[in-house]
Image: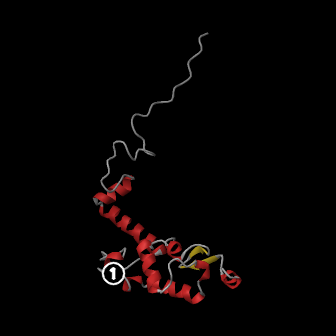
Amino acid sequence: MNPKQNEQMRGIVRIAGVDMKGDKKIYVSLQRIKGVGPSIANSVCKIAKLDRNKKVGSLTDEDVKNIEKIIASISSHVPVWMLNRRSDPETGENYHLVTSNLKFTHENDIKKMIERRSYKGVRHALGLPVRGQRTRSSFRKGKSVGVVRKKQQPAKKKG
C-alpha cells in the first residue's frame, strides 16, 4: 500500500445506519446490516460495480451513497427468490426489508399469529418451539418441569 491510499482509509464507515470497520472487506461488512446476507451482499457489490474484496475504509462518499441507494431498492435489482418478504400478506407484493423495518415487521407478524390463536401463535405465546421440534429432552431451560417441593423446615430441637 502506498502512503496516499493509507491516508484515505477511514477507520469506521456508516452504511445504512450500521458502523463498519474500515479494514474489513465490503462483502463481509455489508452482512452486518440486518436483512443483508451473503447473496444480497454479493449482489450489491456487483450492481455497484465494486470489488467485493475492497476494504470499506477506501470507499468514497459517492460509493457509500450508491450502496445505500441500492440496498433501499434491492427488490428491483435481484430476482424474486432472493427477497425476504415475498407475497406480503397485506399487499401481495414482493420486497426486501432491512434494518429496523425487518425487525418491526417480524414482531408484527408474530403478534398477528398470537391474536389469531393460530398453532404457531400459541407456540410463540407459550415460549415453546414453533417449527415442530421435539420437546421431551430439549427446550427445558427456564420452564418449571416436574414437581416443585416445599422447602424443608429446620428440625425441631429436642429438649
The residue lying at 40 percent from left, 34 percent from top is 147
Query: Which percent across, then down, holds residue 42?
Result: 44, 77
Q: In this view, does 115 lie to the left or right of 57?
A: left
94 or 27, which lies in front?
A: 27
96 or 39, which lies in front?
A: 39
The residue lying at 32 percent from left, 47 percent from top is 134
49 or 122, which lies in front?
A: 49
Mark 1 surroundings: few (<14), some (14-19) or many (≥20) residues within 10 A: few
Q: In which quarter of the image is residue 36?
A: bottom left
Give the vertical position of 120 relative to 66 (above or below).
above
The residue lying at 46 percent from left, 85 percent from top is 70
Q: What residue type is labelled 1?
A: Pro
Asked if one can make out residue 71 in the rendered structure from this viewpoint, the answer is no
Please tell me whether mark 1 sits on a helix, a strand or a loop.
Answer: loop
Residue, far bottom: 62
Residue receiving disc 1? 79
Asked if one can make out residue 18 in the rendered structure from this viewpoint, the answer is yes
Residue, far top: 159
Query: Which percent across, then down, holds residue 86?
Result: 32, 76
Q: In which quarter of the image is residue 158?
A: top right
69 or 115, which lies in front?
A: 69
The residue lying at 42 percent from left, 80 percent from top is 43
Query: Which percent across, then down, holds residue 143?
Result: 43, 45
Give the vertical position of 97 relative to 48 (above or below).
above
Give the vertical position of 119 relative to 136 (above or below).
below
Q: Quadrant of the N terminus?
A: bottom right
Give the vertical position of 100 relative to 139 (above or below).
below
Residue, far front: 2
